[in-house]
Image (tube, coloured by chain):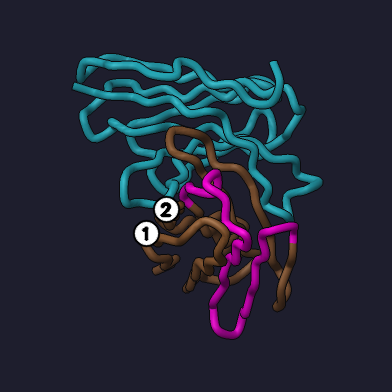
Chain colours: A brown, B cyan
Amino acid sequence: GQNIDQPTEMTATEGAIVQINCTYQTSGFNGLFWYQQHAGEAPTFLSYNVLDGLEEKGRFSSFLSRSKGYSYLLLKELQMKDSASYLCAVKDSNYQLIWGAGTKLIIKP
Amino acid sequence: IAGITQAPTSQILAAGRRMTLRCTQDMRHNAMYWYRQDLGLGLRLIHYSNTAGTTGKGEVPDGYSVSRANTDDFPLTLASAVPSQTSVYFCASSDSSRENTGELFFGEGSRLTVL
């Protein structure tokens, strides 16, 4: 079966750095995506990786290793507004998105 | 309208009743999707449509039907609601020219409670 694993919950301090990991086992791979979802709101697109390496976008970076079936989302200079759930999703060989359950990130002052 | 709009935002429904969740987008995206989101689970695809006039089944299609008469509208119907269909439903769309990025645009969600 297809599986996306990410931690259920993480806590970090305002101004610090946090890394949210995602491991996947899917039938084929056509890209990995990170979405942010604030409580009670819709998910919004953060990043996309299809080749190995690091993609940087402001305070957020996303890394991919296809050989290890592994990705992480790195958030720097954490702000209170970064408190949200972060969803990892992989597009499989049929170009269908397989979603992880999400990581709830709690930022403390 | 700007983006993708869902209605209603919230609904309490008696079991056995018929319910249609509406979804409209004004971005001229060809692909549209319906997901349900339940606590502790990832988003699960119910039905999708790659273009107007075509639809397909996702991971959890039973008990739901969709139609795609035009580009903008993609309603989801529960023919006879059951309590297990209590969930938050998200409609989403994507532009096929950007499909390789997988960027989905989501509506604000419809919270449905079936009693």
Q: Residue B104 at x, y = what percent?
A: 64, 43
Residues shaded magenta:
A57-85
> Badges 2 and 1: C-beta atoms under 8 Å apart?
yes
Image-quadrant location for residue B4: top right
For the residues labelled 2 and 1, the Cα–Cα distance comes to 8 Å
User: Residue at point 40% right, 61% down?
Assistant: A10
Mark 1: few, some, or many residues within 10 Å (few <14, many ≥20)?
few
Residue at 67%, 57% (x, y): give it: A47
- Give the residue drawn at x 62%, y 59%: A77
Q: In which quarter of the image is the N terminus of chain B?
A: top right
Task: Give the chain of mark 1.
Answer: A
Quadrant housing the C terminus of chain B: top left
| In magenta stretch: residue A83 | yes
Sequence-wise, the earlier of marks 2 and 1 is 1
Q: Position of residue A56 (x, y in %)?
A: 74, 65
Residue A53: image quadrant is: bottom right
Q: Nearer the viewer, residue B36 or A60?
A: A60
Callout 1 amino acid:
Glu
Relative image position of residue A73 (x, y in whole percent):
58, 65
The numbered dot on residue A9 is: 1
Badge 2: residue crowd in 10 Å (few <14, some 14–19, many ≥20): some
Q: Which residue is drawn at 43% across and 32% down?
A: B89
| Chain of the residue under the numbered disc 2 shown in the image | A
Give the residue at mark 2. Answer: A106
